[in-house]
Amino acid sequence: MAEENFFERVYIVARQIPFGRVTSYGAIAKALGTARSARMVGWAMNACHNMDDVPAHRVVNQKGLLTGKHHFDGTNLMQQLLENEGIKVVNNQIVDFEKHFWKPEVQY
């Protein structure tokens, strides 16, 4: 199934996000050669709840907002995971987003 293949490609990129860094749905989509697929990247992140090796908490929107936080157990789990990595979050927004942003290498 093509969707499963796309999701696995997303997970390959997400697993490369360094500790203490974040990237965006759009940046992952661009790295995969599918720049208009940011929403599909979001769906992939939402589908990886039981995959401990995919750091979905490190994927945010293009402005550094924790738009996927409602998909994590607990009210502030996404924020807590990021803060445990030294990333400050205020009002669901990553502080110094540009400093923490990691640009994935083009995969395809």
Image: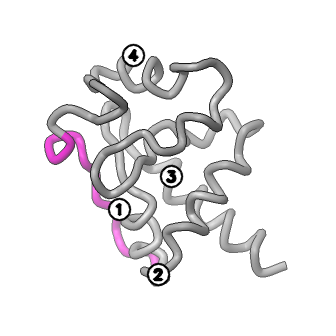
46 up-or-down from 30: above or below: above
Image spot of residue 39 (x, y percent)? 55, 67
Badge 2 or badge 3: first in the primary sequence: 3
From which residue to which does the magenta span run? 97-108
Q: CA distance from mark 4 to mark 3?
A: 18 Å
Is 80 in front, or is 91? 91
- Identified at 28% across, 20% down, the residue is 86
Q: Nearer the viewer, mark 4 or mark 2?
A: 2
Q: Which residue matches tag 3?
A: 14
Q: Which residue matches tag 4?
A: 84
Q: Which residue matches tag 1?
A: 104
Badge 1 or badge 4: first in the primary sequence: 4
Q: Which amino acid type is marked by label 3?
A: Ala
| Element marked by disc 2 | loop
Q: Which residue matches tag 2?
A: 36
Magenta span dominant secondary structure: loop
